[in-house]
Image (tube, helix red, strand yellow):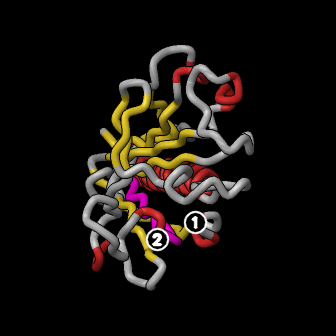
Amino acid sequence: MKRTSGFTLVELIVVVAILGIFGGAIYTMFQTSNRTYVVQDHVVAMQQDARYGLNYLADDIRMAGYDPRGVGEKTFCFQISATWDGVTVGTNGTSIAFTLDDDQSGVLALDTDPQAQKDLERVAFRLDSGQLQRYRNSAASGVNGTWETIINGVDTAASSITYWYADGTSSVASGLPNDSDGLTNNDSDKVWDIQITLAMNPPDLYGNQLQAKSYTTLVKCRNMALK
């Protein structure tokens, strides 16, 4: 009797097993590559957020104390403790507030002043609740002074604002800016440089926390150094 051509059951089982091994290997490689891509995508997004936040801060801080008419160092300067539109602002290790003569009028514009519509004569930032926030005055926002979010994902406990004074010491050594303790080096008008460190909270992906990253920049307070 002539033998019918084809595969035996054993041969089929061997082929299926081999295909299963190759299929499993390919799936594992795909899964690993996909996870790597997702992780790198989140890392890039985290870096971009941090750089955006630092650049945003730096651009505004460079204008701190802008006083083209020479009105005086205590008129346009850092605000150690102030209330704007019922909002408390200050200059310390987690927040910074300052004024500048943006319209070059020689007078700090009030919220009712049309010149304040650009929201640039009163500027404040703070690190709060995992966010970098910026103060918006009532003239610009249409409501009482509010805080708007610049970036999310900030590790506010690990982030910091350090002040460098005219004599080369920092707030780590000389203390935070303070205008109520007499004529000392840590007066607000002696702040020449500001070091900002943003620590970012990486997302929890696949049950594994990514490595935390910190980003630092040093901003020259060019207007304060001229006083």
Percent x, y for residue 183?
34, 71
Question: Mark 1 is on which residue type?
Answer: Met
Q: Is residue 11 visible?
A: no
Question: Mark 2 is on which residue type?
Answer: Lys
Label 2 – label 1 distance at C-alpha: 7 Å
Residue identifier under label 1: 224
Q: Main secondary structure of the magenta part?
A: strand
Q: Is residue 124 visible?
A: yes
Does dot 1 land on a helix, a strand or a loop? helix
User: Image height check: is 70 above or below 171?
Assistant: above
Give the numbered dot on residue 28: none
User: Image height check: is 44 above or below 162?
Assistant: above
The range drawn in magenta is 190-201
Does dot 2 land on a helix, a strand or a loop? helix
Mark 1, Cα crowd under 10 Å, few <14 / some 14-19 / many 20+, is many
- Left or right, 140 with reference to 159: right
Residue identifier under label 2: 190
Badges 2 and 1: C-beta atoms under 8 Å apart? yes
Q: Residue at x 64, y 71 (%)?
A: 226
Q: Residue 114 colored magenta?
A: no
Percent x, y for residue 104?
74, 45
